Image: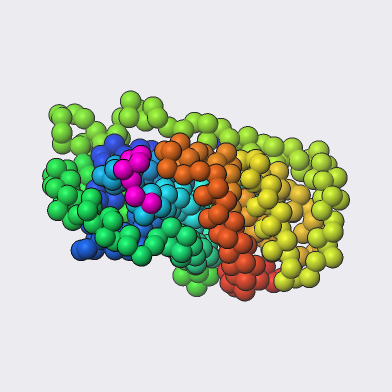
Amino acid sequence: MDDVIALVLGSFILALAVEHYNIHRRLALNTTLIFCGDPVNPPLLLLGICGTTAFVSMWMHNVAAALLMMPVATGILQRFPTGSAQSPLVNKFCRAVVLGVIYSAAIGGISTLTGTGVNLILVGMWRSYFPEQNPISFNTWSFFAFPLALVIFFALWVILCCLYIRRGSSQALSAYLDRDHLKRELQLLGPMSFAEKVVLAVFSMLVVLWMTRRLTDDIPGWGALFNGRAGDGTVSVMMATLLFIIPNKKKPGEKLMDWNKCKKLPWNIILLLGAGFAIADGVKTSGLAEILSKALDFLEKAPYWGIAPAVCLISSLITEFMSNNATTTLVIPILIQIAKSMHVHPLLFMIPGSIGAQFSYLLPTSTPSNIVGFSTGHIEMVDMIKTGLPLKIVGIAVMSILMPTLGAYVFGTDRAI
């Protein structure tokens, strides 16, 4: 059991509340309406759908974000004809939207601690191996990872526009997609209910508390009031608990959340995190990490600037054949061992290793998010390889530039510990 697991548990309960009260659908329709354009502007509409998915993925697990947003995306695509009646231009746009949703969910997850299990495993292992060091807070991680995710996100958008949006796409889409239809769908949802407003308020409060727990050395944040005993998990569970107390004003005595609504909690992810921490501890205490580190001892000869790309590349290749979480759990203890033998800051290895594990863009089976997109029938493996390969290259390049520069400023990786 770890603070990270409490963080995930609370976040999932809040995500379930967002889903239950249809807040994600309202958000998606509003965003699509803003970005749709008149006549339809395909690149702008694609940016709106991808941007919404990435934003949602920042605050919940990337698989949950993909599962929430894919029905919204396919709902837009259902307005287009299918089969032989579908023009090549519309077909390409459909592929771009599905690819955009699965990759945006993965990219958005990088930018916050709660976005994906990989970031949480990294934070948990950092605390486990180096308890005397400052823990990586929500704020610290976002300060580094958000710019990284933003650059990769815009690279994704450019790649999709170049590969899948052609001249004439606007005219082809305008016949089936108009602002009036979107407005009607939004009107059918009606005005925001009391329950929706409160869930949104609780969610906003959670984000503010996460961002202000630890600020700087001069401005310690509210966490200092509890002498470091309150973590991000404390806030997450406290906000989730509020949902079980506040009434939803729909039925007398009914609260915003109850245990029946929580039955869809993905316990497998929570158990997987716990198992990951246990395995990492086993790798450390059994001496296996030292043996495995010898297989990667060639990295010891790598120059400071070459460490991040080498580690990121190795991790991003392994993750195509294993789950992101399993890759991180396997690779991080080995990288810590190598960092110790090289006398460099462990995060210089750990962060590229964990972020590289999230670059699983090539195969449908690499991550559940990819399977969600592949199962729609709109994309094929060749589409994933065609889009995923340049995206992976961009991701590794951006990581290689930011880690020794911004990473050194945020995490102090330019000095050994």
Most foreground residue, 217 or 332: 332
**Which quarter of the rendered picture does the C terminus lie within?**
bottom right
Left or right: residue 105 compared with residue 295 = left
- Name above or below for residue 181 compared with residue 408: above
Most foreground residue, 343 or 238: 343
**Which quarter of the rendered picture does the N terminus lie within?**
top right
Residue 212 position in % (x across, y down): 42, 61
Residue 307 position in % (x across, y down): 73, 65
Boundaries of the magenta span = 82-88
- Name above or below for residue 193 compared with residue 344: above
- Give the image quarter of residue 271: top right
Left or right: residue 417 compared with residue 56 = right
Say which residue appears at 72% left-offset and 71% top-offset: 305
Say which residue appears at 45% left-offset and 36% top-offset: 375
Residue 105 position in % (x across, y down): 45, 50
Observer able to see residue 179: yes
- Name above or below for residue 258 compared with residue 178: above
Q: Is residue 85 magenta?
A: yes
Left or right: residue 257 compared with residue 154 = left
Say which residue appears at 65% left-offset and 52% top-offset: 316
Q: Is residue 387 magenta?
A: no
